[in-house]
Structure formats: structure tokens, C-alpha cells
Image (cartoon, rainbow, N blue to C red):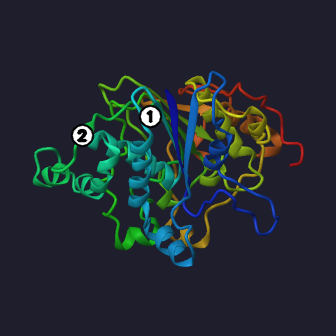
Amino acid sequence: MKRIVICADGTWNIRDQVDKKTGRRHPTNVTKIARAIRPQSSDGTDQIVYYHEGVGTNGPLDKVTGGAFGKGMEENIRNMYRFIVYNYEPGDEIFLFGFSRGAFTVRSLAGFMNLIGLIEKDDDYYVPEMYHCYEKSKGPDSPEWEKAFHNVKGNRPCPPIKLIGVWDTVGALGAPGVIGQIFNKNKYQYHDIDLNPNIENAMHAVAIDERRKPFKPSFWGRPMSWQGELQQAWFAGVHSNVGGSYSPDGLANEALHWMVEKAEALGLECDKEYLDHFWPCFNSVLNDSMTIAYQVMGPYERQIGKRVNDGEAIHQSVLDRMQHAKCDYDPPNIEGYHDNQANIPVVNTSRIKRGEPCPDL
């Protein structure tokens, strides 16, 4: 048995990105977790990692086409699928992590696997035809399906997915980007990003303070027959305060350690010494993502307390920030939660000491 870990980063995010003003490195939570996973756990279980940079990272042209239209997402899904096909053996555990459009990507990967199953290595020639079936919602009774699988030697059912862990999933509107919403808004509606029977655990960290309309989050809904564990927790900050890439990253680290704690409980083994460098600080800098372009589009307020039956929760760091006078934190969409008497659960993180104000802010 081994663990296969897929990590998909957000738009324009790469593993070695550096803040041009400060010279400081500012990795996302996806990069942090990809680096933290030990090649082999203490009991000898191999853990192999596939990391994929975000769309829009392959030069100036791709920055526009990938960032504005989401170009490249389909190829990313196919490549991640192939990696699993090449490496999976019965009994292996699969973990999927993603941020922003990378979150959308790994959730869609799970939907693709649920439809297609797992082919054998030497049949990967036919992945484009199989993806066409997914893209066009063509099932086993369709001519397209028959054509795609005509020469396939063997097809296994979709294996269990131990965990999908995502930070602030950008939804159907955000997938094609701002410009793509105008010219290509229907292109990505076919993606199946819902929970399916193969997914055993799902964790979603969501930003309270993100107000950009194109960044409307895609929440999971709990299917009636689904037997897995679902948790969708609110964290203070805007999109990249929760998923990472800002510096300082104290808020992102709150969401990082919450996710790592769940993954470790499910058996994934990480390098504690490395992760200890990323200190969670509830009173760290909260950025403003509402640039002029997004202000023109008007704000979108994320509603809290509407999805209690879908694993909704508030992380303790949010209440800590609200109760810390110097933070002056009172988001309008979380009114009534100051006294910790919320009608939705409060979750916390115990794998690392937290709750102390950031010393340099």
C-alpha cells in the first residue's frame, strides 16, 4: 500500500514565487503541504506527490489566457488522472488538495474518475476521448462512450478517495476568470465538482472576507446517500489570505494547520519540523482584494450560517480575531457571533500551539 497525493495550485501560483517588493517567498498552502509530505511514513508506507502549478503560469500569453479564461484546466485534469493511472495499485490511498481553481480542478478530477473509473497504463492513449465523454456528459449508453472505450483493454471502478482538501474553491463563474465570464461563461458548467460515493472525507476552508463576485465559492452539498465526513470551515481573510500566497501568511497558516491535522488523522504523514515554520496568527494582516475593476462589478457578500447541514463551521481563529480589540474585526456577514454563541459549530486546531497574537504586527 502507498499514498498518492495530488496537489493543484491556484491561478498564477507557482512553488517558488517571491514577493517582488520584499524579496520574501510566499508559497500557497498547496505548495506547503506538497513540500511537507514525507516520502515515506514511519511505518514504511511510500507517499508520492504530484504537484501542479496553477493555470496561467507558463509565460505572458498563458498568464492572460489561463488567468482570464481558465485555459489549461482540462489538460491539468487529464495529467493528474494519468498520474493516478500510472501509479495506483489496489489498496492505495488517494489524497487530493487544491486552492482556488486548483480546488475546482481536483474536485472535477474526482468527478471525472467517478464517471470513467481507472483504465490501465497502456490505454492512456484514449484519455482525450474519455474526457470528451465527461465534457459532453455522455454516459455508457452513448455512441461517444462506445467509441472511447472500444479499444480499452481493462477498466477498473473508481478507487476510494481518502480525502479531498481544498481552500476556497472558485466556482463555475470563477473557473473561466473575469473576461471568460463575459465571453465563455458556459464552458465549464459540465464539471462535476460534487461529492460522490468514492469520496470518504471532504474538507473545505472558506474565506469570510472575500467580496469579489467572480470569486463566489462553490460549496459542497451533502448528498442524501453519502456516508462520508464533510467539514466546511470559515476563516478570516480574503481568498489568498486563506489559501496562501500573501506575505505575511499568518491567516493562511490557520487554514493550513486545520487541513493538515485532518490529513494526519487519516494517515498522511508530514514533516512537523518543516510545518512548524508556518506559524498561525489570527491577527495577521488581512488584505483587501477589491481592486477598482472588481469594485465596478459590485461586491458579493458570502452568507454564513446557511449550510449547517453541509458541515458548515467557524474556525476558532475567527472568534479570536473578533475578540481581540486591536484587530477591529467585525465582518457584517458574521454578525451575532461575538460571544461564541453561534448556531453553527466552532472548530479548532490542536496540532500546533495557536491563539497568541502575532508578535511583529
Quadrant of residue 183 in the image?
bottom left
In the rendered structure, find residue 246 and report the number of the disc placed on it.
none
Q: Residue at x 53, y 67 (%)?
A: 56
Q: Is residue 187 left or right of residue 259?
A: left
The percent position of residue 180, horizontal first and vertical second, equals 41, 70
Instruction: Identify residue for label 2.
Output: 154
Few, some or many residues within 10 Å of mark 1 (<14, 14–19, 20+): some
Label 2 secondary element? loop
Instruction: Identify residue for label 1.
Output: 307
The reply to whether discs 2 and 1 touch (Cβ–Cβ < 8 Å) is no
Viewer-side residue, 245 vs 267: 267
Disc 2 versus disc 1: nearer the observer: 2
The percent position of residue 18, horizontal first and vertical second, equals 74, 63
Q: Is residue 341 left or right of residue 134?
A: right
Q: Residue at x 75, y 29 (%)?
A: 352
Viewer-side residue, 27 vs 314: 27
Q: Residue furthest front?
A: 122
Kindly identify the amino acid type of the residue bearing the numbered disc 2. Gly
Kindly identify the amino acid type of the residue bearing the numbered disc 1. Arg
